Image (cartoon, rainbow, N blue to C red):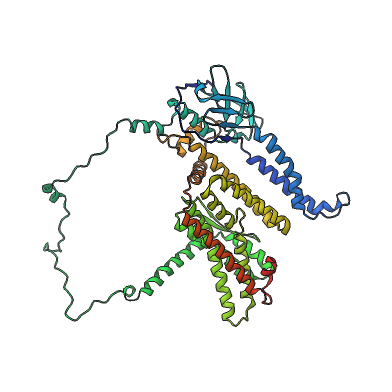
């Protein structure tokens, strides 16, 4: 492939920023590590007794995590941390070769091509090479479609940078290489160079009558008669809502509840719900299964209602056997207050339903212990969700609050919540909590990706806004030439980029909003503990409190 070279003019000076580290994607490695952990866990669980006559292993999951996790941690520190590209105010630095290029030293931005082997077949690769006058060069590309962390080409070693489009855009923007700019950026320059604003032309009074709407007439052409006023002593009957405000209030909230209930029914995925019902029915009873699914579903409907209020599209409510349920959205709210509002509404709805079941138990003369049992298990489920561990509701609320205070504090808080989850899982022996910690770790990785994208976006000027189309323009110049994306794949890529962009631009919470979420969180926890303590002495209903203690 013939190279395309763009000469770089002098760079522009921007305010100092913190360094940004772009490293090869780690997702495939993490997936392999998780597979090894699960495989080792199953092996130690079912065959551990025969290992040297040591007997059964007390904590097989923790042992498996240590066996696989320690080498993985060493690889992260010794290998992964020493690869990638560092971006700062001075320029670029290749962490693997210690090659450093200052912004003012960049003389050429070359778009090169080569053929590499992919599954035994040649694949066309496009990559970027930044060169200086003395021959120093840094090469990068998005090697994700090839599943490689680096690849050797005729020009030299090319490393995988998932944000290659953003990096190329930043290099072009910092060096003002307009030959690489997308049409959106060029249009911004043209619009700011002297385009006239649309003028406002007032309407003349004589011409106003020509544009006025025609007067209403009846069928015979005569003007309509005015309405006959009510006779003396005759009163017009006011609507029921005006005479009784309580009726208006009831109709309003009843309509909202019916709408929410209908939306919730439409978003519930039937097959996972039936699977969860069967699992609970086999272990307990079908009555308990139906009531506990009602409790979980009502909790998730609280999330759905909050998503609807915040303008977030809902993908569906998924029931997971013995794990609970999840209200999956197709995006995020525009602010951290909105996301915290979405998270806290699930426990609010679940707490209200638990209180209703407890009230029903006492109203019926304390004869139906099943009602108290459902109230207790519902309270336990919602209290479990309030644990400050990602990805539970409490962990996500902790993340929104801490990120609003400080970005770095938010990352440390989320990482600390994962460590807390690991400790609780270890001492309690809850494998379920280990699964939650793993899911939280994956979500934490997405947050780190969004933070990196935010740090990159902060380096762009106001006249170069970053959008999916602009990012796609640069990304297409630095990735392999593979089969074109289908419309579905393109939509998924746009949704993923928009979600990361939304997360990177989340509006922090204000002081009063932080106080509301904090007080609500503490209040819900207290109420749920009181519910569990209340049913602890009821025969056949105290198992939930026994789990807590």
Q: Would you identify the image quadrant in which residue 359 lies?
A: bottom right
- Name of the residue lying farthest toward the top: 134
Q: Which residue is drawn at 39% across and 30% down?
A: 186
Relative vertical location of residue 222 with respect to residue 371 in this rendering, above or below: above
Q: Can the viewer see residue 268 in this picture?
A: yes
Q: Nearer the viewer, residue 532 or 229?
A: 532
Which of the image's four quarters has the N terminus? top right
At horizontal 30% and vertical 31% (from top left) the residue drawn is 194
190 over 155 or under it: above or below: below
Q: Where is residue 180 in the image (x, y as percent from the top left)?
A: 45, 27
* Horizontal side of residue 135 vs 249, given as left or right: right
Question: Quick check: 246 left or right of 341?
Answer: left
Instruction: Say which quarter of the image contains residue 124.
Output: top right
Q: How many marks?
A: 0
Q: Position of residue 298 (x, y in %)?
A: 54, 65
Seen in the picture, residue 245 relative to 443 is either above or below; the reply is below
Residue sticking out furthest to the bottom: 365
Residue 25 on image: x %, y %: 61, 37
Residue 297 horizontal/vertical position (percent):
56, 64
Say which residue appears at 30% left-offset and 74% top-offset.
Answer: 239
Identify the residue at the far right of this view. Answer: 53
Q: Nearer the viewer, residue 235 or 212?
A: 235
In the image, is residue 242 above or below residue 202?
below
Residue 300 visible in the picture: no
Q: Which image quadrant: the C terminus?
A: bottom right
């Amino acid at each position: 492939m013939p190279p395309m070279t763009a000469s770089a003019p002098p760079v522009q000076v921007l305010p100092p920023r913190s360094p940004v580290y772009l490293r090869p994607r780690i997702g495939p490695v993490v997936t392999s590590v998780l597979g090894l952990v699960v495989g080792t866990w199953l092996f130690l669980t079912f065959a551990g007794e025969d290992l040297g006559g040591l007997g059964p292993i007390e904590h097989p999951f923790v042992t498996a995590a240590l066996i696989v996790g320690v080498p993985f941690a060493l690889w992260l520190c010794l290998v992964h941390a020493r690869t990638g590209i560092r971006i700062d105010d001075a320029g670029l630095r290749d962490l693997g070769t210690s090659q450093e290029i200052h912004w003012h030293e960049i003389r050429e931005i070359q778009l090169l091509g080569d053929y590499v082997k992919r599954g035994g077949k040649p694949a066309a690769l496009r990559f970027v090479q930044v060169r200086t006058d003395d021959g120093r060069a840094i090469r990068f590309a998005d090697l994700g479609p090839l599943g490689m962390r680096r690849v050797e080409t005729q020009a030299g070693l090319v490393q995988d940078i998932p944000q290659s489009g953003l990096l190329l855009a930043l290099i072009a923007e910092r060096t003002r290489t307009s030959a690489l700019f997308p049409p959106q950026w060029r249009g911004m320059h043209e619009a700011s160079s002297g385009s006239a604003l649309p003028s406002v032309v007032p309407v003349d009074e004589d011409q106003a009558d020509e544009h006025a709407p025609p007067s209403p007439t009846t069928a015979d052409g005569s003007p309509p008669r005015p309405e006959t006023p009510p006779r003396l002593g005759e009163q017009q009957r006011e609507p029921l809502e005006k005479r009784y405000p309580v009726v208006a209030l009831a109709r309003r909230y009843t309509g909202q509840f019916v709408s929410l209930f209908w939306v919730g029914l439409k978003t519930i995925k039937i097959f996972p719900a039936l699977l969860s019902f069967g699992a609970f029915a086999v272990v307990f009873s079908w009555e308990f299964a139906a009531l506990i699914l009602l409790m979980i579903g009502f909790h998730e409907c609280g999330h759905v209602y909050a998503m609807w209020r915040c303008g977030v599209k809902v993908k569906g409510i998924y029931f997971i056997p013995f794990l609970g349920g999840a209200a999956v959205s197709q995006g995020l709210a525009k602010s951290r207050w909105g996301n915290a509002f979405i998270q806290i509404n699930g426990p609010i709805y679940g707490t209200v339903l638990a209180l209703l079941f407890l009230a029903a138990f006492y109203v019926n003369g304390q004869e139906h212990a099943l009602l108290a049992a459902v109230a207790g298990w519902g309270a336990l489920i919602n209290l479990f969700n309030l644990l400050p561990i990602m990805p539970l509701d409490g962990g996500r609320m902790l993340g929104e609050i801490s990120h609003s205070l400080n970005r770095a504090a938010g990352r440390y808080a989320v990482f600390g919540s994962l460590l807390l989850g690991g400790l609780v899982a270890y001492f309690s022996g809850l494998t379920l909590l280990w699964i939650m910690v793993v899911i939280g770790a994956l979500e934490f990785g997405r947050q780190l990706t969004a933070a990196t994208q935010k740090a990159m976006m902060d380096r762009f000027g106001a006249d170069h806004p970053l959008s999916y189309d602009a990012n796609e323009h640069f990304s297409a110049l630095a990735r392999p030439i593979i089969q074109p994306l289908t419309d579905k794949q393109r939509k998924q890529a746009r949704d993923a980029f928009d979600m990361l962009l939304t997360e990177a631009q989340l509006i922090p919470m204000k002081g009063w909003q932080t106080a509301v979420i904090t007080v609500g969180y503490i209040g819900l926890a207290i109420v749920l503990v009181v519910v569990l303590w209340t049913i602890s002495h009821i025969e056949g209903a105290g198992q939930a409190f026994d789990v807590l203690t």
